Amino acid sequence: MAKVIVVYETKYGNTKLVAETIIEGLKKVKGIETALSELKKVDLNEIPDYDAILVGSPNHLGGPTRGVKKFIDKLGKLNLKGKLGAVFDTYMGGNFEKAAKKMEKKINEKVPGLKLVAPGLSIKVQGMKGPILEEELPKCKEFGNKIATQMKT
Ligand SMILES: Cc1cc2nc3c(=O)[nH]c(=O)nc-3n(C[C@H](O)[C@H](O)[C@H](O)COP(=O)(O)O)c2cc1C
């Protein structure tokens, strides 16, 4: 069984829903075991048990949350050589840079062992508290499905 963990932070629940929908997509591929964890509950020591690590954050002031940034720094201290990774964010709009882009940059700098296997997914919410735009949810499922398919090859 290939194992994937999806770690997310959320203030209003939208990024959690994205994480759950990505899991639905991952589970469409046979032989993939999934785990879902809120960032503050994740046990860092268990991270190396997974073959793929997905990290999600709401966009706060044009970047990921402070907690997510710290988490990526901590990933850099683990041995994750050969593991796969991917990131996602939720955002409201405006001329801000996507948090996913910044997370990818940080992972490439700080966690070189982690190979990003899909371009970061950015999901638009309607207002500060959401909800997620209806047409955005299928993208989450597709994202999960694409990553799971890559893990099997
Ligand atoms: C402190 C704060 C700063 C935010 N800054 C941005 C921003 O710079 N750009 C943006 O598109 N959305 C911004 N938002 C909106 C969030 O992206 C939105 O609340 C979030 O995607 C909802 O996800 P959640 O339900 O998982 O918290 C901000 C929200 C908060 C609370």
Image (spheres, rainbow, N blue to C red):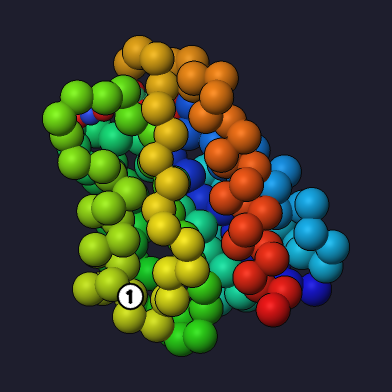
Residue at the image point whose x is 40% and y is 15% from the top: 126
Foreground pick, 63 / 136: 136
| Residue assigned mark 1 | 111
Residue at the image point whose x is 51% and y is 57% from the top: 54
Q: Relative to residue 116, is residue 144 depicted above or below?
A: above
Give the total number of marks visible in the rendering. 1
In this view of the protein, can residue 39 be seen by the observer?
no
- Image quadrant of ligand 1 equals top left
Residue at the image point whose x is 33% and y is 30% from the top: 91
Tell me if the residue at label 1 has its CB under 8 Å from ligand 1: no
Sort mark 1 into few (<14), some (14-19) or many (20+) by Cα contacts within 10 Å.
Answer: many
Foreground pick, 127 / 73: 127
Q: Quadrant of residue 70?
A: bottom left
Foreground pick, 100 / 36: 100
Q: Secondary structure at mark 1?
A: loop
Rendered location of residue 151, percent (x, y): 66, 72
Q: Quadrant of residue 58?
A: top left
Q: Is residue 46 left or right of residue 89?
A: right
Q: Is residue 14 left or right of residue 147?
A: left
Rendered location of residue 109, percent (x, y): 22, 73
| Residue type pointed to by label 1 | Val
Q: Relative to residue 75, is residue 29 depicted above or below?
A: above
Residue at the image point whose x is 57% and y is 50% from the top: 143
Q: Quadrant of residue 63?
A: top left
Rendered location of residue 57, percent (x, y): 38, 42
Which quarter of the rendered picture does the C terminus lie within? bottom right
